[in-house]
Amino acid sequence: MPTSSSPPAPARNWFDQGGSAYARFRPEYPPALAAFLAATAPARTLAVDAGCGNGQLTQLLAPCFGHVIGVDPSADQIANAAPDPRIDYRCAPAERMPVADGSADLVTAAQAAHWFDLPAFYREVRRIGRPGAVLALVSYGVLRMDEALDARFQAFYRDEIGPYWPPQRHLVDTGYATIDFPFAEVAPPTLEIRCDWSLPQFLGYLTTWSAVRSAREAGRDALLAAFAHDMSAAWGDPDTARTVRWPLNMRIGRL
């Protein structure tokens, strides 16, 4: 629906959530994803999660493997990961992972590969992977909501916040379909992420978007306030849980 240029401000600043927002609001991957990846790997000795962030997929892999290493260049992200005796977090880029040669049964990159120097990352995967090891690039597409909310969200995503996404976002929107992937591919199952969220949780998730941060830095807080106002009006009671879904996209390859 169209919005005025100066809407009434929402009751709170939904887009001011603080530095721990990523750990608090990012949606969790379904257990079926980890089960599929573990079943596809040649063994379950070691999984390496590159660009692991605060360890969402890393933690899901932990019950399926003897040992899991999460690698991320951000010390802040790793600091927000929940400790787990089965997981070893290491601060390093995906292109130079501190992992022994030929040791990994599975290498994953969840919602991260679009930031990598892919040729350098692929060299690292071949270095650390054992024969037959599996590489999984995982991403989730544009979310969908209840019909009463979805049209307003899609307009925000496409037309309003869209110009503030970095170019790499296109790779996520297409499910990594256009990237070079020089591995023998394995067909992935059809999976999705599903969350039942309140309005604060939904808008908190949006604070983790790089596009939202860019819009705020560009002085476009009014754009964000207009969207929050419209969603608040359509949502009703902000504590009401509404279903949010993301399709999971995967490129799975075997070394």
Image: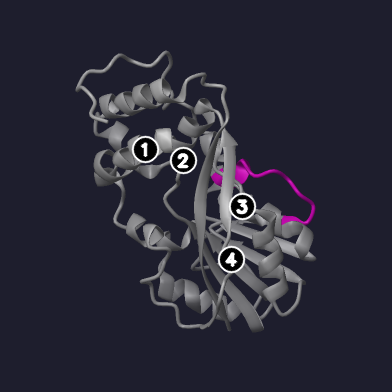
Circle 4 or circle 3, nearest the eye? 3
- Amino acid type of the residue that numbered disc 1 sits on in the rendered structure: Phe
Query: Of marks 3 and 2, which one's residue comes earlier in the chain?
Result: 3
Judging depth in this view, the residue of 89 and 217 nearest the camera is 217
The answer to whether residue 212 is visible is no
Q: Secondary structure at mark 4?
A: strand
- Residue displayed at 30% across by 24% down: 226
The CA distance from mark 3 to mark 2 is 17 Å
- Residue displayed at 44% across by 74% down: 120
- Residue displayed at 76% across by 49% down: 84
Q: Which mark is residue 153?
A: 1
Judging depth in this view, the residue of 32 and 79 nearest the camera is 32
The CA distance from mark 2 to mark 4 is 28 Å
Residue at the disc numbered 4: 108
The answer to whether residue 236 is visible is yes
Question: Dot 3: within a 10 Å radius of its alpha carbon, few (fewer than 14), some, or many (20 or more) residues?
Answer: many
Residue 164 percent across, percent down from the top left: 27, 44
State the colouring used for the structure image: one colour
As for residue 82 lying within the magenta part, the answer is yes
Q: Are marks 1 and 3 in contact (CB under 8 Å)?
A: no
